Image (cartoon, rainbow, N blue to C red):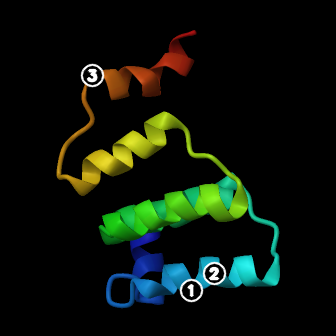
Amino acid sequence: MYTKACNLLGVRHIPHIIRDVIRSYEAEGCLVTVNMFREVLKLCKEAQLADVALWVLRKMQYSFNLHADTVMYNVKVMRVHGCSPNLVILSAILDPFTS
């Protein structure tokens, strides 16, 4: 599904489209939710746009006062540097399901 969306929107070839959409939401004062940002981050993941994903995470916090959890942020940072999540990160992801 995200592959089709990336192809339809041309996200791989025009990565600034994601920035344009989020800036438009900000300029028009639109209501945004964490779910909207989650979908945008999934598009970034599919298009392999780590730098745009980090920009989105910063924009969430500073412009919309939405805070990504530590696990979400760490996984994105690790992907930027070509690393895989370590045991601590994976444990944090699975922890809510084991309680």
Q: Amino acid at mark 3?
A: Leu
Q: Tags 1 and 2 in contact by the CB under 8 Å rule? A: yes
Q: Which residue is mark 2?
A: 23
Vertical arrangement, residue 16 with respect to residue 70, above or below: below
- Mark nearest the camera among 3 and 1 is 1
In the picture, the disc for residue 20 is 1
Element type where label 2 sits in the image: helix
Residue positioned 18% across, 44% down in the render? 83
- Local crowd size for mark 3, using a 10 Å CA cut-off: few (<14), some (14–19), many (≥20): few
Residue positioned 32% across, 21% down in the render? 88
- Mark nearest the camera among 2 and 3 is 2
Residue farthest along the top direction in this orientation: 99
Element type where label 3 sits in the image: helix
Vertical arrangement, residue 89 with respect to residue 23, above or below: above
The location of residue 99, given as percent across then percent down, is: 58, 9
Residue positioned 34% across, 72% down in the render? 47
Q: In this image, 30 relative to 24: left or right?
A: right
Q: Which residue is mark 3?
A: 87
